[in-house]
Amino acid sequence: MSEANAPASSNAGYRPETRLVHSGTLRSQFGETSEALFLTQGFVYDTAEQCEARFKGEDPGFLYSRFSNPNVSMFERRMIELEGAEAGRATATGMAAVTTAVLAPLKAGDHVVAAKAMFGSCRYVVEDLLPRYGIASTLVDGLDLEAWRKAMRPNTKSCFLESPTNPTLDVLDISAIAEIAHRGGARLIVDNVFATPIWQSPLTLGADVVVYSATKHIDGQGRCLGGIILSSEAFIAEHIHTFLRQTGPSMSPFNAWILLKGLETLAIRVRAQTETAAAVADALALHPKISRLIYPGRADHPQAALVKKQMRAGSTLVGFEVKGGKAAAFRCLNALKLARISNNLGDAKSLVTHPATTTHQRLTLEARAELGISEGFIRFSAGLEHRDDLIEDLQAALERA
């Protein structure tokens, strides 16, 4: 959490749905029901002595909204208690969370091992950005535990993965990879966006750091950007707090307030979207225009046993490959009436993405092929529409493919 006072009482003993409504709330003297909105850049102090003490960290409270803000602190505390973390810091975007979590603890001469299958911007950070600062990186097949072992070096400080992966929904063994990382003296950072904190808890599986793009399911209604890093008190204090304070990828108080409202309905939305995604996957699994369908909740998922072991349910996303490549995929996308073309996910509205030309377009054709991102591959993010309407929309569009 930031410099602000924590709430007087913790809701950590309650179930997730209750924590999502109550955790972190800081009420003003007016006793408002909904969280108040604190749109302020700075704060005032009763005395110069109090100001000095606060800057020294001896007096709890807020300093400046780049450092901390009541709305941001409430959002951080709610996420901390939901995730079961010791501490957390919010960021302006999900990529700010990933970049900070990966880069802030490292220095020139360090080494990072990461799974190849990840969001294009995440791969850029690991593969292109880190080496500019003297930090080496190795990309591995995230499903191959032996590849993780072989990639570890004496100077490996961090391992990074997404699970399920973007966009092909592979599920990586977090516990096993955490063990490999720890044996080599490294930390494991997990991007948990596709699973959401409702269906997967990486910290309980051995991960050291969890990151989210709050832009996705946490907001869930296409309104704002945000991110968060969750970990131990030591990691946040030693590596993240000062980095964020001095470099400034701060979350807007208004965005934090919106995300607090989003968290109140997160469990309800994710459950409904997951049920819809499962129904869509079942309806399309044997469609003659589809050559491959992948959904973590189905028995034919390549890592079905692992899904049952480390996830509480599937995902809100379905991936499928349309026969006929890019032209057929584009015909299908253009024929949809309900599901809209977008590069976002986790929204109340169903969204479809063509990863080869959007989120992963910067990768070479060979790199995309290695990850299973074909020209015909489509990623579907289930919204809150009636599942039958979505299935009918997708089936009709596939006929145009």
Image (cartoon, grey):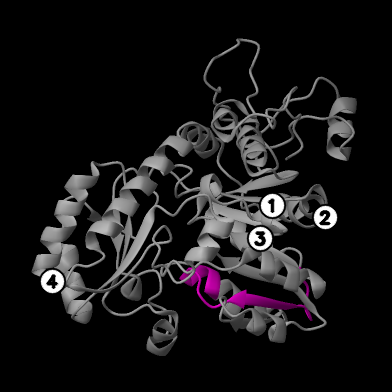
Camera-side residue of 150 and 110? 150
Residue 9 position, x and y percent, is: 74, 23
The amino acid type, in three-letter code, at marker 1 is Thr
Residue 204 position, x and y percent, is: 69, 52
The amino acid type, in three-letter code, at marker 3 is Thr
Determine the residue positioned at 34% across, 76% down. Answer: 356
Q: Which residue is mark 3?
A: 100
* Sequence-earlier tag: 1 or 4: 1
The amino acid type, in three-letter code, at marker 4 is Ala
Q: Is residue 237 left or right of residue 379?
A: right
Task: Indicate whether 288 appears above or below 46.
Answer: below
> For numbered disc 2, what is the local secondary structure?
helix
Q: Which residue is mark 2?
A: 238
Number of residues whose C-alpha sits closer than 10 Å to that of mark 2, classed few (under 14), some (14–19) or many (20 or more): few
How far apart are the two marked residues, 1 and 3, measured between alpha carbons? 22 Å
Determine the residue positioned at 15% across, 54% down. Answer: 393
Residue 303 position, x and y percent, is: 49, 69
Q: Which residue is mark 1?
A: 204
* Sequence-earlier tag: 3 or 4: 3
In the image, which residues are magenta?
A: 106-123
Tell me if residue 160 can be seen.
yes
Camera-side residue of 97 and 92? 97
Q: Which mark is residue 401?
A: 4
Q: Quadrant of the N terminus?
A: top right
Determine the residue positioned at 68% across, 53% down. Answer: 203
Q: Give the number of the mark in front: 2 or 1.
A: 1
